[in-house]
Image: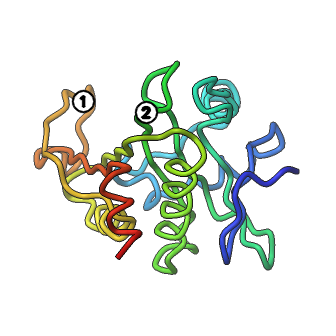
Amino acid sequence: MSTFLETARMALRPFTAGDVDRLVDLDADPEVMRYLNGGRPTPRETIRTENLPRLLRRFPATGTVGYWAAEANDTRAFLGWFEFRPVEEDSPAVVELGYRLRRAAWGQGYATEGARALIRKGFTELGVQRVTANTMAVNVASRRVMEKAGLRYVRTYFADWPEPIPGAEHGEVEYALTKADWELTERQ
């Protein structure tokens, strides 16, 4: 399997059809899904017919897929996935950063490590000019990862969700980082 990006502790690779069980296991953890849908597992059929095709999709703007499976370098254990997907189909200028990691990988710096590596690759190799990321305002851990990766708070907004989950009343937050700001911090 080809590696898209390797960090000190993990490799990011494209998903394959053989990843369905890993994705089912990831989305079966109520804590992993807490800020996404209130903790409900994603049905296997949904993962197979909807989620996996989305994870496999290539984007002409960057010449890559928008989602990568993350595996530990030492054990090849599945850690979860990262998103680095163009917001507009035909432009690499703005990409959305996201991550979903297994609970066993939480608190070990993997999310920050992967996010920083993707940001660097995006700004230096893929033509990215701005990285954006969103989460629920109450998702303190994810917000902290965004900040550690260099993104800054932009705004709080309120989406109209068909099935609000606990914490939705506090809204969603957007964080962002521009290439120019990233270059300034890299020079320091």
CB-based contact (under 8 Å), mark 1 and mark 2:
no
**Mark on residue 161?**
1
Residue at the farthest front position: 187
For the point 15% across and 44% down, the residue is 171
In the displayed structure, would residue 87 be above or below residue 112?
A: above
Quadrant for residue 94, please give it: top left
In the displayed structure, would residue 58 be above or below residue 27?
A: above
Mark 1 and mark 2 lie on one chain; the one further toward the N terminus is: 2
For label 2, the residue is 93
Badge 2 amino acid: Ala
For the point 67% across and 77% down, the residue is 8
Locate residue 141, reporting x and y percent. 33, 68
2 vs 27, nearest the viewer:
2
Badge 1 amino acid: Trp
24 vs 109, nearest the viewer:
109
Q: How many marks?
A: 2
